[in-house]
Amino acid sequence: MTEDVLTGAKQDMEKTLGALRRELSHVRTGRASTSILEGITVDYYGAKTPLNQLATLSAPEPTLLVVTPFDKSVIGAIEKAIKASDLGLNPLNDGKIIRIPIPQLNEERRKLLVKNAHKHAEEGRVAIRNVRRDVNDHLKKMLKSHEVSEDDEKQAMAEVQKMTDQHIEQINETLKKKETEIMAV
């Protein structure tokens, strides 16, 4: 009975960790990476369409991204969407492809990106703790309705706490790695 609850908690915590890693992959570093363009949507014939569904994204050099649209008529809309994003990028459109030079980050911008990464990590920690709280509440209800014994409830709560600690440690490691990436010159 408690195994199902613990399995569900582990899955929820893993989803939270995965979401944080995806979110941090969008945070810019000093190197060109196509993942920073993943959150951009383009107005394509009245529908908001993800950029990666309208074009091929590549990083041929450490300081350059190249966007090659499948449909050349949408190149202006792609350029506009990239400029409108809060990434601070300046796309260069030659009519066939869009080149996006990735400028070196200044110290102020790096600190802002690190602060943003810390915010995302804290949201992840809060989400993990919320999973723990919900599972503990569920275990207490199961105890109250005599679905589990007190020993099983205490053992399951200890296991949930152990899972919580492990996932928060993984969040901290992920954040530290991203912070190192951002601050590297």
Image: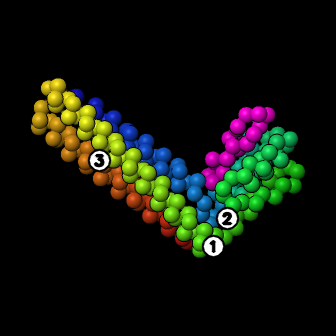
Q: Residue at x 86, y 41 (%)?
A: 73
Query: 2 left or right of 79?
Result: left
Question: Mark 1 or mark 3, which has the lower sequence index?
Answer: 1
Name the amino acid, label 2. Answer: Pro
Mark yes or no: residue 27 visible. Answer: yes
Q: Residue at x 31, y 52 (%)?
A: 166
Query: 98 left or right of 138?
Result: right
Marks 2/1: CA–CA distance: 17 Å
Please name whichever residue, 159 or 82, is drawn nearer the observer in this view of the structure.
82
Identify the element where label 1 is drawn.
loop
Q: Position of residue 119 (x, y in %)?
A: 47, 57
Marks 3/2: CA–CA distance: 38 Å
Q: Which residue bears the numbered disc 1?
A: 106
Please name whichever residue, 81 or 100, is drawn nearer the observer in this view of the structure.
81
Q: Nearer the viewer, mark 2 or mark 1?
A: 1
Instruction: Confirm whether the magenta stretch covers residue 97.
Output: no
Name the amino acid, label 3. Answer: Met
Q: Position of residue 173 (x, y in %)?
A: 40, 60
The magenta segment: 34-53
Tell me whether circle 1 and circle 3 mark residues in contact (CB < 8 Å). no
